[in-house]
Every structure is written in structure tokens, then in C-alpha cells.
Image: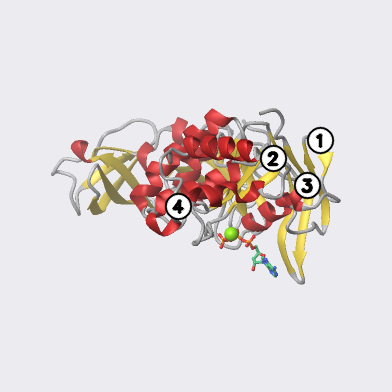
Amino acid sequence: MAGGEVELIELVKRFDDVVAVDDITLRIAPGEFFSLLGPSGCGKTTTLRLIAGFEQPTSGRILLDGRDMVETPPNRRNVNTVFQNYALFPFMTVAENVAFGLRYKDVSRAEVKARVAEALALVRLEGKQDRRPSQLSGGQQQRVALARALVLNPSVLLLDEPLGALDAKLRKALQIELKALQERVGITFVYVTHDQEEALTMSDRLAVMADGRIQQIGTPRDVYEEPATVWVADFLGTSNVIEGRVETGTSVRVGDFVLAVPAIPSGISGDVLKLVIRPERVGLVEHGTTGDNLVPGMIERVVYQGPTTRIMVHLACGQDVQALLPSLDAGAELRQGTPVCVELPSSALRVLPAGPRGFRDRAGVPAPA
Ligand SMILES: Nc1ncnc2c1ncn2[C@@H]1O[C@H](COP(=O)(O)OP(=O)(O)OP(=O)(O)O)[C@@H](O)[C@H]1O
Ligand SMILES: [Mg+2]
């Protein structure tokens, strides 16, 4: 499948006094699995509806394969949408549901049959074509909805929380299936979800959104390992956020302790900043150990979570951090009230500005480090 490039340029959508999409610029490459990730109400669905043509932008442009789409009605855009409530026709068979979109196209009966069979094979529903939706499981119904969209050979498929109605286990299985399917067909997927694990699992790249704006764009590894703001770090899983002050170009003072950090970015204004570190990067060593980036503290809580154990430590500098250890490494000596030294390795510390939510200004997305 050729094509499938999506470009949004300074896209804005206002509903009365709500700015649902606030100046979004991004480019999605042909064949890319791209996710829009963000909390409820941040403008994900609105962005998707703008791409599909169900909404008109207040300002800005939408290009599909380089062509401006603003004047093009939804049915003339080579784009198809799969919604969360996949709304199959209950009185039609699976095959009839899948064939529905071809009804208004100039396609012979033989071709309809062949394309329906092909789409059902893609979603692994061969043999189920004569059933009614009520005779299928939730996951199978979701796959019918996908087949119904794929049968039209769109170059871009828009998916709005398509797995939202499914239970956690089925969701996980379908995440892997959907990603494999996308790789096989090579169609561009624009995938909306508020589930960070889902976005990290499936995407080639993702945009993290809040309040109608893009906070960061990157690969799952980029945004997880190198969050651009405290807010992104926090949204993408638990993070420790430690307040500090600039000491030198490569060190930060936290209370009585000085921590070595990777270079302090030039964007930090003033001398107050935040250090962000993932719990899985925090080490625990014996109390009294000396060396770089060690801060003494006291274990406040130990939470066993099956494969991992979460250990909350109150540091001598007054702040709290969490460490996440494989349960096999979290021995019985780690219990509430035990003094320890917390190791905050320099390479794992991310230095970020200390804004209220750590948002960057409108200048946009900084180049990756
Ligand atoms: N037709 C509309 N009229 C007025 N306001 C709207 C309309 N559609 C969306 N909004 C508002 O725009 C903002 C973004 O909504 P949107 O549906 O895009 O969010 P979302 O990120 O998809 O959220 P969710 O995860 O809950 O689906 C919200 O504040 C919402 O109330
Ligand atoms: Mg939505």
C-alpha cells in the first residue's frame, strides 16, 4: 500500500470557549504506527475526527499524502475509522457487516466476496463469516470492526480506543495482534489511547498530549526514558521527582547533598530545578556506604507486587523516593524502619525545569537530545 502520510500543521479546533486542539503540528510517516496518548479530555478524539473530516478545523491545515484535505469530505479521504463502540449491525452476518462499506463503491460481487474473505483472513476470522455479531466474543467483534475498515483499503486507519471495551487480558493479546497486523498490511495507523502501557507497547512513535497541546513526540523509548517535562514523566508511569538547586554545570544540590547529574540543560532558567528518576533505576545499598550519588534514608513502606517489590524511602534531605526491585532481589532485610542508602545514578537522573506542571511554552517540542 503506497502513501499514507499525514501532516497536521498548526491545527486548532475550538468549541465555543473550549480549545480542544491547540496548535498541533506533526508529521506521520507512511506505514507508521503512531499513537496519540493523553488523559481524558486532552483532545485526542477531536484530532482524529479532524483527520477523518468529521470536524472542520478552526484554523490550520491537514495534509494527506501532501494534499490539503480541508475541502475534501470524509468519504473522499482515503482514511477509515474504527471507533471504541464498534457498532456492528446486529441483524447482518459477519460477512455482510464487513462488506457494508463496499456497497457504495463500484465493486463487482465477485470482488466484494474476495475482499471480504481477504479482510476476514487478515483478522483471523476465517470460517466465521455467516455468524451474527451476537454469536461472537467481544474480541472477535472488535476484529470484525477492523476487517470492516480494512476492506476499503484505506491508506490511513484511525483507531479511537478500539480496545477500550475489552477486558485486560484480551486487550493485551489484541495489542500484539493489532501491531502484527499493522506491520503486515503496511497501512498508517493513527491510534488514540489514554493507556500509557498500550501506547508504549504498540507505537513506532507517539505524541503525548495534555490540554489540546503536544507535550512530546518520540519513540516509546524516547518519551519513557527521556521525558521532556515532569508532567510527561509522571503520565508515563511512576516517577520520582526531587527538587534541587543548580550547584555547578554538572551537579545539583538537594538539601545537604550534592548529586552529580548529566549536564544541566541550557533551557533551565533560575537555579531551581527538578530531578526525575524512574523507580527501577533507583538502587538500595547498605546504610553507611560511601560514594557518589548516595543519599541516606529510612525505609517507610515495602509493597510486594508479585514480580516486583516497591520500596518507599524517606531521604535524609527530607524528600521521598520509590525504588522498584525485582522481588527476588528484595530480601527480608528490606523492611519498614531499616536505614539504607539510596543510589541515584547520575546517568539515570533527568534534569528538568521546575514549572508548575513542567510544561514547556508554546515554542513547541525541543529537538531530541
Ligand atoms: N462537539 C463538542 N462541543 C463542545 N466541546 C467539545 C465537543 N467535542 C469535544 N469537546 C471538548 O473538547 C475537549 C477535547 O475532547 P476530546 O473528545 O477530543 O477528548 P479525548 O482526549 O478524546 O478524551 P477521552 O479520553 O475522554 O475520550 C473536551 O474538553 C471536550 O469536552
Ligand atoms: Mg476520546
* Neighbourhood count class around disc 3 (C-alpha, 10 Å): few under 14, some 14–19, many 20 upward: few
Of the numbered discs 4 and 1, the one sitting upstream in the chain is 1
Q: Nearer the viewer, mark 4 or mark 1?
A: 4
What's under tag 4, amino acid-wise? Gln
Numbered-mark total: 4
Of the numbered discs 2 and 1, the one sitting upstream in the chain is 1
Residue 200 image label: none
Question: x, y percentage for residue 86?
Answer: 53, 56
Q: Nearer the viewer, residue 267 or 329?
A: 329
- Rounded to the nearest angstrom, the CA distance separating label 4 from label 3 is 26 Å
Which element type, helix, strand or loop, lies under badge 3? helix
What's under tag 2, amino acid-wise? Val
Q: Nearer the viewer, mark 2 or mark 4?
A: 2
Q: Residue at x 19, y 37 (%)?
A: 328
Query: Which residue is the site of mark 2?
Result: 107
- Rounded to the nearest angstrom, the CA distance separating label 2 from label 4 is 25 Å
Which element type, helix, strand or loop, lies under badge 2? loop
Residue 76 image label: 3
